[in-house]
Amino acid sequence: MRLHEHQAKRLLAAFGIPVPRGEAVTSAADARRAASALGGPVVVKAQILSGGRGRAAGIRTAANADEAERSAGDLLGSRLVTAQTGPEGKSVRAVLIEEALPVARELYAGVAVDKKAPAVLVLASAAGGVEVETRAAAGAGIAREALSAEGGLLPHRVDRLIEALGLTDAASVRQASELLSNMAKAFVALDAGLIEINPLGLTAHGKLSALDAKVVIDDNALARHPELAVLRDVEDLSPAEREAERFGLNYIRLEGNIGCLVNGAGLAMATMDLIKLSGGAPANFLDIGGGVTEDAVAAAFRILVSDARVRAALINIFGGIVRCDLVARGVLKAVAERPARIPIVVRLEGTNAVEGRRLLAAAGLPLLSSSSLEEAAAEAVRSAGKAASP
């Protein structure tokens, strides 16, 4: 779950991380009020879940409240197109009015999961700003230190990170040490997948401040963070993702053309692996879970076939807690509402599998049945290839 900049800064400030004074507003009149309260020059920042806002004129300076009101009026209701949004852009529904600080240097600090390590890494660089991702991909100029499972960010690792930031005077070193340690604490406490401060500003007065902030929360941890779950911007989800969330389904869109409806994450991964081994590519990860209802199965099937890229569907159910007849009824309910436009390969095994297969056969649907997962995956790949042919 991605958070907007103003939400991320509010969370980080609670962990003692310095952030500029500011307020998120949704009208030009409120932008004027917020800028007047701050006094002096301010920055007007479009709040969309995308990087590259500055290059897309989504971040503007305003010398006074009049300019802040005009800039906010220009941004609110517009669609901001960045390198990350795609050509359709994202609608600006809020702006952050923030004090403009006299920045002497732009640094970088972050905490992220490194799946290759595998470890949680704290990162630091003396050069922050818009090019940091390019430098990170090239492995240049960014220090990486792992969090200790027992002791968090250990002192000797902090020292190396501060060295990478290029800070030498005692006051800056002390601030950086506290900031990096607090970022690590926040990462663990929030069940985050990423915390990034870019740029981390060093002001002309020698103060560190998070000029921008990105926080990504692990969706799987939201059950124990209801205070964070309410921060989700539903506009960040596709219609399919919103529907899946409403029914408690685990759905992730992928880049292939074979839709998968499976129960259990392990079986879903095995199904996708076999599709790849058969020469195809899965269009999604869709796990209906264990305590699923007939309506949720119907919703899952609707989500699967609503993707225009999907050329074949593979329903692979190993009935345990989930009964195969319940899944069959859910699929039939969805097809009754909207006839399937693609070939459907079905494998039902386990609890009430015979009844499930009987229900599907009696419906007279053009289904391809298989008792073997390998055969089912291969048939889905063949069917997708035929459907994709002119």
Image (cartoon, rainbow, N blue to C red):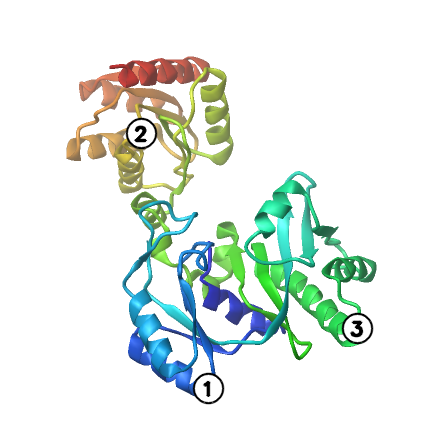
Query: Which quadrant would the C terminus be assigned to in this image?
Result: top left
Chain-order first, disc 1 or disc 3: 1
Marks counted in the figure total 3
At label 3, which amino acid type do we have? Answer: Asp
Q: Which residue is mark 2?
A: 309
Q: Is residue 279 above or below residue 307?
A: above
Horizontal relation, residue 142 to residue 57: left or right: right
Please report whichever mark, 3 or 2, sits nearer to the chain's N-terminal start. 3
Above or below residue 116? Residue 82 is below
- Upstream in sequence: badge 1 or badge 2: 1
From this viewpoint, is residue 231 visible?
A: yes
Q: CA distance from mark 3 to mark 2?
A: 57 Å
Q: Quadrant of residue 364?
A: top left
Residue 71 x %, y %? 34, 71
Q: Which residue is mark 3?
A: 169
Packing grade of label 2 (10 A; few <14, some 14-19, many >=20) is some
Visible residue check, residue 26: no
Residue at 76% from the left image edge and 73% from the top image edge = 174
- In three-dimensional space, the C-alpha distance between marks 1 and 3, rounded to whole angstroms, equals 30 Å
Identity, as a three-letter code, of the amino acid under mark 1: Gly
* Distance (Cα) linking label 1 and label 2: 52 Å
Q: Residue at x 76, y 56 (%)?
A: 150
Give the residue at x 48% y 56%.
223
